[in-house]
């Protein structure tokens, strides 16, 4: 709709951001299960940015995607078009995480305040100071829950120097290229999941059919587990995946016992076996036939400091991080782009 009205989405690479500039990250906060049922008004994120601009007393020079996952990879582009601001080709996660302290901005020491929340009814709350990122998460989650478990979030306000120092560069371009690879594979009649693996550096973890979904919305999150019975090469085994808005840990259980396939912060993603379409935690249902992939996290999420916040123990699992090989955005994806003859903006 914004494009039909003549607005444009302008994307800047991270290295074009001036160190003395300023802007903010935007995303949605709440439970995905609520988000698919509760229609947005459409300008909540831009309204949250305006509230934060009003508090800090200056206009933003850019908008940053708060997390390059799901709807949060698209809605900030809408806000940027409405604001007439560029959106930066970067984010602080390289995936999605369910809590505010779980990004490279907070890990890198960017202040978690001030920040703003805005809901579909026009209600706005601005926090001018909090103790730390964990307090920001707790307080923002309580307000979001009171707003119906769905709100727009503008956090953090940060300088260009902070953005360039802490953000994961090129994630919007990478997401675009992944989508192009899947569409091209469909047109050519080849496996779209193989195409995605080539550009993402990921690996197949499990192939199966959903036989059980234990999912509940509580405390502002979608929590639970999903269990798949193995198909083809995985027949005779099961895979169980832990959920908190995102997929956190995948275990395979077979004749040889239980094996950890992948853990956060590496990305565990579930895809329709035929189309390659992603299946989010809110879309899980009995009988879906899925491929489970593991995609390596960005290097910034694998440091000791980062793993204290985004590793499996940060979510309550007594497991060591089991890293997949490679890092998000490694040069293999650029080589694959060159081979395909495509040119990203």
Image (tube, helix red, strand yellow):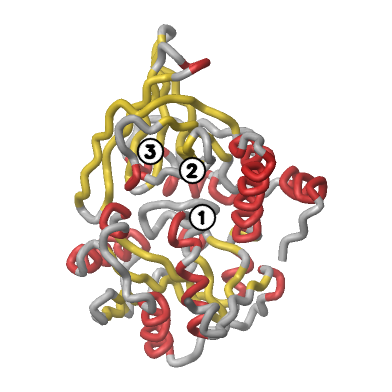
Looking at marks 2 and 1 on the same chain, the residue that comes earlier in the sequence is marked by 1
Q: In this view, does 231 lie above or below 129?
A: above
Q: Where does residue 13 sit, x and y in percent of width and height?
A: 68, 69
Q: How far apart are marks 2 and 1 (CA)?
A: 9 Å
Nearest the camera: 278 or 88?
278
**Which class describes the residues within 10 Å of circle 2: few (<14), some (14-19), or many (20+)?**
many
Q: Where does residue 325 sit, x and y in percent of width and height?
A: 63, 33
Tell whether label 1 touches label 3 (CB within 8 Å).
Answer: no
Give the residue drawn at x 62%, y 66%: 89
Q: Pointer 2: what residue?
A: 265
Q: Pointer 3: what residue?
A: 313
216 left or right, relative to 225: left
Judged from the image, the secondary structure of the residue bearing numbered disc 3 is helix
Judged from the image, the secondary structure of the residue bearing numbered disc 2 is loop
Q: In this view, does 201 lie above or below 48?
A: above
Give the residue drawn at x 24%, y 40%: 215
The residue positioned farthest toward the left in the image shown = 146
Nearest the camera: 216 or 328?
216
């Amino acid at each position: 709709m914004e494009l039909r009205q003549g607005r444009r989405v302008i994307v800047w690479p991270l290295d074009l951001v001036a160190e003395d500039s300023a802007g903010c990250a935007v995303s949605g906060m709440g439970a995905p299960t609520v988000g698919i049922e509760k229609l947005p008004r459409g300008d909540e994120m831009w309204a949250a940015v305006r509230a934060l601009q009003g508090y800090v007393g200056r206009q933003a020079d850019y908008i940053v995607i708060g997390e390059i996952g799901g709807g949060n990879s698209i809605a900030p582009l809408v806000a940027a078009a409405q604001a007439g601001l560029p959106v930066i080709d970067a984010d602080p996660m390289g995936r999605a995480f369910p809590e505010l302290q779980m990004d490279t901005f907070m890990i890198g020491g960017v202040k978690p305040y001030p920040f703003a929340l805005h809901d579909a009814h026009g209600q706005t709350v601005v926090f001018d100071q909090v103790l730390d990122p964990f307090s920001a998460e707790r307080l923002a989650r309580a307000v979001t829950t009171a707003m119906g478990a769905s709100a727009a979030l503008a956090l953090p306000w940060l300088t260009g120097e902070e953005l360039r120092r802490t953000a994961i560069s090129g994630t919007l371009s990478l997401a675009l290229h992944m989508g192009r690879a899947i569409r091209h594979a469909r047109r050519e009649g080849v496996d779209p999941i193989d195409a995605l693996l080539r550009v993402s550096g990921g690996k197949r973890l499990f192939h199966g059919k959903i036989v059980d979904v234990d999912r509940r919305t509580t405390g502002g999150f979608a929590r639970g587990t999903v269990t798949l019975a193995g198909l083809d090469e995985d027949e005779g085994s099961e895979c169980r995946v832990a959920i908190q808005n995102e997929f956190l840990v995948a275990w395979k259980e077979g004749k040889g016992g239980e094996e950890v396939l992948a853990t956060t912060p590496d990305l565990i993603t579930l895809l329709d076996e035929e189309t390659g379409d992603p299946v989010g935690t809110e879309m899980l249902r009995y009988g879906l036939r899925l491929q489970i992939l593991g995609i390596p996290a960005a290097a910034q999420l694998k440091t000791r400091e980062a793993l204290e916040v985004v590793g499996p123990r940060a979510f309550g699992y007594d497991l060591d991080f089991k890293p997949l090989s490679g890092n998000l955005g490694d040069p293999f994806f650029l080589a694959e782009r060159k081979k395909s003859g495509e040119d990203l903006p």
